[in-house]
């Protein structure tokens, strides 16, 4: 019988411990090791099992060590980049500035229903007069919306406020077809995809177009998409409504003003969380638009290739792609560094003084965050934060955090 010493061929074999007892000289017979009593198949199987386990451990240890090295390398690289480009590195830049407008969520009612209803009733006569000035078709649309959102006093008050402020019927969307009132009324009647609750969708949307500051990304890494939506809703609420209506339709597709077609994410119901349906559907679709050839995975809230996560959020190019397509105009994307910071801040001041809003990327906590600058006043930079509020930071601190800006 040929004895294949398979154990000797195993490079990961277990050697005897140093304190193992030595064999006695002249021993006539020793107990054979267990492996020797097995046939060739048994010993081969044991060898490969042993080798596989030992190899896997070595590989796992190497991978873990590699992960640590990659993590350390990435951190050192980040420190070097930030010190080079901006002259300073911080592991945590802090979060919020001074929140000077922090409204309640669109779907959160703090006051009693009776208190809100009293305010609505107090303006009923004024509301009737304003409604009488609208075309007959628009009066019908308004009444239908009132009926649909009857159970939501906050939404009823928001609709009434827009009428009294002269924001209804409103301007047309970027397709040039529907006004805000026309698009809201159409959404109240159109066919909807399974899972879309009409009353909830329209009620929240009415509050969001009445005060777009309430639009919030919540706990998702969608600041680029959500801040772009806030900006759009402020500038053209009819367009914001048109896009939401398209995504809520059975086929879940809508064409942007810039020509691109976006689609409702298949898993949108599973990833809704505590966001409103309107913001959730639109933000997820825009994240998919912004990442180019990659895939946005809404459950993990990250961008992937071949089911492997690459990064969260969006970078400068993705942000520019979303802004350009949403608004159908070219944006100049600028990386702010310590060498051009004064020029970028000056350009931002000129743009906001001319009534333009400027989306910017800031160093935020241990990463980055996209906000929309509205103006500079009394040494404070005022901006819209897609966490559902308006904030301000001193110019010096804002400049230290500034990483990118988008101008048109």
Image (cartoon, rainbow, N blue to C red):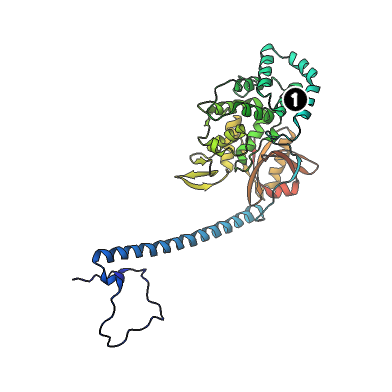
Q: Position of residue 192 (x, y in %)?
A: 55, 25
- Please state if 51 lies on the left or on the right of 228 as rendered: left
Tag 1 residue: 161
Outermost residue to the left: 1
- Please state if 360 lies on the left or on the right of 31 as rendered: right
Q: Position of residue 219 (x, y in %)?
A: 62, 43
Quadrant in the picture for the C terminus: top right
**Identity of the residue drawn at 65% across and 29% down:** 205
Total count of labels:
1
**Identity of the residue drawn at 74% across and 13% down:** 132
**Identity of the residue drawn at 72% across and 14% down:** 134
Q: Taking the image as drawn, is residue 30 in sight? A: yes
Outermost residue to the top: 136
Residue 128 picture quarter: top right
Q: Out of 151 and 256, give the one closest to the viewer.
A: 151
Which class describes the residues within 10 Å of circle 1: few (<14), some (14-19), or many (20+)?
some
Residue 319 picture quarter: top right
Q: Is residue 161 above or below residue 316?
A: above
Quadrant in the picture for the N terminus: bottom left
Outermost residue to the bottom: 26
């Amino acid at each position: 019988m040929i004895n294949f010493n398979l154990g000797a061929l195993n490079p990961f074999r277990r050697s005897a411990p140093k304190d193992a007892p030595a064999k006695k000289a002249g021993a006539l017979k020793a107990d054979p090791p267990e492996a020797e009593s097995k046939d060739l198949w048994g010993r081969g199987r044991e060898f490969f099992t042993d080798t596989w386990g030992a190899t896997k451990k070595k590989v796992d240890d190497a991978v873990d060590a590699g992960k640590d090295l990659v993590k350390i390398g990435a951190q050192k690289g980040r420190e070097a980049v930030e010190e080079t480009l901006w002259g300073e590195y911080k592991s945590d830049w802090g979060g919020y500035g001074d929140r000077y407008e922090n409204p309640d969520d669109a779907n959160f009612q703090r006051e009693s229903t009776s208190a809100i209803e009293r305010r609505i009733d107090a303006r009923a006569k004024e509301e009737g007069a304003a409604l009488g000035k609208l075309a007959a078709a628009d009066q019908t649309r308004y009444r239908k919306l009132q009926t649909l959102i009857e159970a939501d006093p906050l939404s009823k008050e928001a609709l009434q406020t827009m009428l009294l402020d002269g924001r209804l019927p409103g301007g047309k969307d970027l397709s040039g077809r529907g006004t805000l009132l026309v698009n809201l009324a159409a959404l109240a009647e159109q066919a909807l995809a399974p899972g879309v609750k009409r009353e909830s969708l329209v009620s929240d949307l009415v509050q969001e177009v009445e005060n777009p500051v309430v639009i919030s990304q919540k706990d998702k890494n969608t600041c680029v998409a959500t801040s772009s939506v806030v900006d759009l809703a402020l500038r053209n609420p009819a367009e914001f409504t048109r896009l939401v209506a398209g995504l809520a339709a059975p086929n879940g597709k809508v064409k942007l003003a810039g020509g691109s077609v976006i689609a409702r994410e298949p898993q949108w119901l599973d990833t809704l969380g505590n966001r409103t349906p309107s913001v959730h559907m639109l933000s997820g679709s825009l994240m998919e638009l912004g990442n180019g050839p990659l895939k946005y995975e809404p459950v993990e809230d990250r961008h992937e290739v071949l089911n492997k996560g690459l990064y969260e959020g969006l970078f400068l190019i993705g942000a520019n792609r979303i802004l350009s397509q949403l608004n159908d105009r070219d944006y100049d994307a600028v990386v702010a560094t310590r060498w051009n910071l004064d020029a970028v801040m000056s350009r931002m001041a000129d743009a906001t003084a001319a009534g333009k809003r400027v989306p910017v990327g800031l160093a935020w906590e241990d990463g980055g965050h996209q906000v929309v600058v509205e103006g500079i006043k009394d040494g404070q930079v005022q901006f819209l934060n897609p966490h559902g509020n308006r904030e301000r930071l001193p110019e010096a601190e804002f400049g230290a955090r500034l990483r990118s800006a988008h101008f048109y």
